[in-house]
Image (spheres, helix red, strand yellow):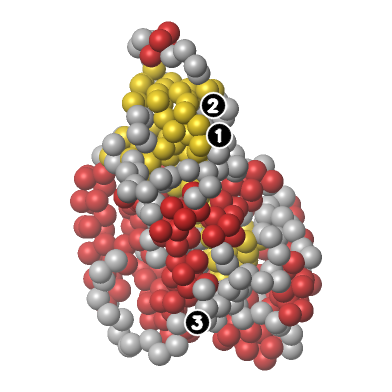
Amino acid sequence: MSILLKNATYIDWKTLEFSQKNIFVEEDKSEIKFIDNIDKIANNQNVDVLDCTGKYVTKSFGVGHHHVYSALSRGMGAPKKSPENFYEILQYVWWTLDKCLDLEMIESSALVTAIACAKAGSTFVIDHHASPFAVKGSLETIAKAFDKVGVSHLLCYEISDRDGVKIAKEGLSETEEYLKNRQGLVGLHASFTVGDDTLEQAVNLMNTYNSGIHIHVAEDNYDQEFCMKKYGKRIIPRLNEFGVLKSPKTILGHCLHLDEDEKDIIRNSPCWVVQNSESNLNNNVGYFNGEFLGKNIMLGTDGMHSDMLQSAKSAFFVGQGFDIINYPSAYERFRNVHRYISENRFNGDGDNNLVVLDYNTPTDFNQNNFLGHFIFGLNSNHVCDVISNGKLIVRNRQITTVNEAEILKISRERASKLWKKMQG
Ligand SMILES: [Zn+2]
């Protein structure tokens, strides 16, 4: 069914120009049309008409780095040992959790994540998944769940040697099977858990399927120390020697502990950096600084939540002490995910991806002060309706494509099962 957003205030996401528009959106047609005389269309029974009087319509959002696998961790008990550093956080929290995931838990994790992303205005998600004892079929399970909700995706499995060669091989096979049928990336956990053999095979896959690598880089200084000790070089030179940074599809997560040479290499490469400020605060690993990293910086949530407006605010506020970020660059990083997707010709982020914001502000809101509202006013509570690939997937703050209550009920049961398994 086509959609007519009538009487909207349309905000062009690139120029920030405000204009009064009737917007006609057709499913699977990536272009949208602006219509002056709506009478004929508004009376067509096959057109869903949304009155957007007093509301703002703009391009929907995208998540540059997410972790579906962590969705069922919210509210879980404390780990067996209280982690004292980054490695112990992985060991006692995330690697304990991911080993217990089965395909049903992954399905629930993906459904609740897709719903949360959609309700917060994101219609495209780049995810980095791990489930070492349920590798096979995990990516297709996530893809199907996202498709059901109606959120576009770019998935990968985080291949790693941390659970042994057999599981690393399973990660490589899962990636290859997935890339045969779907758009995706070749995921690697991080330099410190990926040996040279696995790294080489992952880059071979990247080249065979014309894909990119999605990897955590220098999230904690431990990653650098390990690399120096084991390979006698720093992380970026190591990855670069294998060809990881050659692809414009490659995404380097975090990039907190890099020296000037490493920043030069990244800046002079076509690859991308994804920033996740709240996760860095939570893990107490340091602060992101985009200076000397070039223009290809986007934002993610790192599985902390699914709210990109919040990620942008955090990047801006945390960055005041540590980063060169300002209003325009905060917005640019927030929107760069669209440039990453379009320059690499991935599907699912055309102009027929829109968000309707019910934003009643006590001050004037216009092209000249949009960025002030972006940082201090707009938040995901204002996301009212969401159109993904021309389909209305959120209407009046409710998901239209799936039964959210039922999905949450099942996910709570599966989360309890997961938590019990983690205690065992
Ligand atoms: Zn991550």
Above or below: residue 356 compared with residue 231? above
Answer with mark 1 or mark 2, whichever residue precedes in sequence.
2
Q: Are marks 2 and 3 in contact (CB under 8 Å)?
A: no
3D distance between C-alphas at marks 1 and 2: 6 Å
Instruction: Please give the name of the residue rendered at 59% of the width and 47% of the height, measured from the top-left corner.
Output: 338
Query: In terms of secondary structure, where does tag 1 sit?
Result: loop
Residue 76 visible in the snapshot: yes
Closest to the camera, between mark 3 and mark 1, is: 1
Instruction: Please give the name of the residue rendered at 41% of the width and 68% of the height, measured from the top-left corner.
Output: 98
Q: Are marks 1 and 2 in contact (CB under 8 Å)?
A: yes
The percent coordinates of residue 205 (x first, y second) are 69, 57
Above or below: residue 299 compared with residue 230? above
| Horizontal side, residue 414 vs residue 256: left or right | left
Instruction: Please give the name of the residue rendered at 59% of the width and 60% of the height, measured from the top-left corner.
Output: 329
Task: Specify the label residue 285 is tagged with.
Answer: 3
Task: Specify the label residue 351 is tagged with.
Answer: 1
The percent coordinates of residue 158 (x first, y second) are 54, 64
The percent coordinates of residue 357 (x first, y second) are 38, 41
User: Which quadrant of the structure image shows residue 51?
Assistant: top left
Closest to the camera, between mark 2 and mark 3, is: 2
| Horizontal side, residue 172 vs residue 398: left or right | right
Answer with mark 2 or mark 3, whichever residue precedes in sequence.
2
